[in-house]
Amino acid sequence: MTTTLDPAVAEPASAETTAEIVIRSHRLRTRFLLAFLLGLLAVLAVGAGAMYAYDQQYAGRILPGVHVGDMDLSGLTADEAAARLHREYDRLADGTIIFVAGDKQLALAFSRIDRSADVDGMVAQAMGVGRAGNGLERAIANARTYLRGVTVDPTVTYDPDKLARWVKTLASLQLVWPADATIDWTKAGYQITEAVPGRQADPTLAIASLSAQLGQLDAPNAITVDLPVTTIQPAITTDEARAAVDAANRIAADVRIVDGKHTWTIAGTSLAPLISFSTAADGSITPVFDESGLDPILKTLAQNVNRKAQDAGLKLVSGHVVVTGTSREGRTLNAAGMKAAIINEIGARQAGAAASPVAAVVKAVDPKLNTTAAKAFAPKMRPISSFSVYYFVIINNHWGGNIEAPATKINGTVVPPGGVFDFWKVVGDLRKLPGEGPGNAIEGGKITVTGAFGGGICTTSTTLFNAAFRAGMVPMARQNHNEFINRYPPGLDATVWIVGTVKQTMSFKNDTEYPILIQRIITDAGSRRWITFKIWSVPNGRTYKISNLVIRPGPRAIDTVVRDPTKPVGYSYRNNFPADGAKVWVTVTIYDHGKLHWTKRYYSNYPAVNGVLVKGTKT
């Protein structure tokens, strides 16, 4: 038999009973919280006291557990820690940087850049461990430091500015400027001084490499670093100089001037000094030719190139004029044209062309009397004028030699159409003429016996002057004597003389279409001689007229006696007779086939010349 029991059912509590339970629970929590807070405050108070005691124990000292690297600095003062660090790390200042610059090595001590351990910094960091933050933070930090320890990394310091300055200074010492190749002209030719490359060091990479190593604690005490050295090429290299010299030698090769079969050479040695060398912006060097330097060279060339035209010759043979010799064309160098041609040749050589002959730039000069014309004129030539003057053969004219010698030199002279006769150009140096010697000189109203070499020569020039204008030749240079000489036509004498470099000549121009030939004749006539000049030519239709002669008396001359102690008593010699002064005007007119061709009125002022009688006084 089974028995089933009903569960018991509790009676519900009353409201009053529930409230009491809630109040009792609240009171319990409050009491617990208060007890906890009081306990916590007690703990904190104990901790604060302990921390304070801890701080006071390590005041001015490094807290336990603090290391710098492997070195334990716990409990040390700053000075003690610094001393230990110095002992350990002062070695970092002992070292050397070795710079390798090409084949050179340069050393720089670490001390130069103030490399050392940062002791002050490391001590400051060690002393600062556990000293920052509020009390709680410091308590936590101190606990951690004590339990786990704190390690300060050792630090190395150096002066980067000093490092940069030293490296740059060492780099600058490696600087060697390049030397350009030079070219000089010597007697042996162009001489080249070879170029020398320079070098320079770049400090940039060395500074970067050292900066990375010097800050490391484990850097070696000998740091080797490359100081890269690069080559500085010269602006003008030896090869460039050689190329320029090759070009200059092409320019300075001999220049051959050609005119038909005739050649002349301008030596390269005279051209080379005119070449200089110019450097362009790109560094290339080229020869430069001084064109103005050709001017003196061309003057010398002209002396060799220029050739006078040669007239056909005429000669008097057995009373007839015959042709002798042949004419030849002359030439003169055109300096401007020749210079341009040479410059063109030099320009071609500069461009690389080989030397080639240069055609002479000349102007042909036709002879004034060519062979054909001479052959046509010669048979027709005859005397067309003649003039004679007498003279005495005495010491005053070197016994006639000073008259006859220049006349002989003039004899046979041909003046072609358009040509000019000049007395001194034909006669030349009197001292080279046989028979010439000292003769009279008329100066200041006095005649000095043998006072002038060639004295008396004016008889020759006066005679030819008169023969010339009587043949229709146009007078040019003419001057009267310093004495009125009655052997000559009044106002138509023509003196010639040379004093130093000053000359007085007698000249005339043949402006006819025919040549003239001058013949001189010397004739003895007892106590005197006659000099005659004949002008031979084809009759030219010229005539002359002398007119309007005016002679006014001038100063009166007196006779004087000069006593010569070197001559014996009884010696007497008449040096010259008194010659009064005079003023003379005369007109000479030349007509061509009846028409006026040329006219001139001459004025001559003759001073008085006293007579001189020489008497001996020697006993």
Image (tube, rainbow, N blue to C red):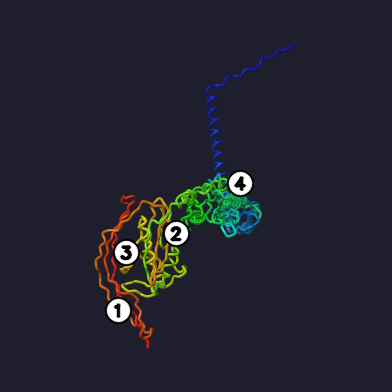
Instruction: Give amino acid for label 4.
Output: Ala
Instruction: Give amino acid for label 3.
Output: Pro
Of the image marks 3 and 1, the number of the one nearer the N terminus? 3
Residue 489: give its label.
Answer: 3
Residue assigned mark 4:
143
Tell me the distance, in whole angstroms, between the alpha carbons under discs 3 and 1: 27 Å
Of the image marks 3 and 2, the number of the one nearer the N terminus? 2
Q: Disc 1 on helix, strand or loop?
A: strand
Label 3 crowding class (10 Å Cα cut-off): few <14, some 14-19, many 20+?
Answer: some
Whether residue 564 is situated above or below residue 117 in the rendered picture: below
Q: Disc 2 on helix, strand or loop?
A: loop
Q: Disc 3 on helix, strand or loop?
A: loop
Of the image marks 1 and 2, the number of the one nearer the N terminus? 2
In the orientation shown, which residue stands out farthest toward the right? 1
Residue 134: % across, % down: 53, 45
Residue 413: give its label.
Answer: 2
Of the image marks 1 and 4, the number of the one nearer the N terminus? 4
Q: Nearer the viewer, residue 185 or 346?
A: 346
Label 4 crowding class (10 Å Cα cut-off): few <14, some 14-19, many 20+?
Answer: some
Residue assigned mark 1:
560
Residue 277: % across, % down: 53, 52
Q: Which quadrant of the structure image shows residue 533?
A: bottom left
Residue at position x 36%, y 83% in the image = 571
Quick check: marks 3 and 1 in contact, CB under 8 Å? no
Of the image marks 4 and 2, the number of the one nearer the N terminus? 4
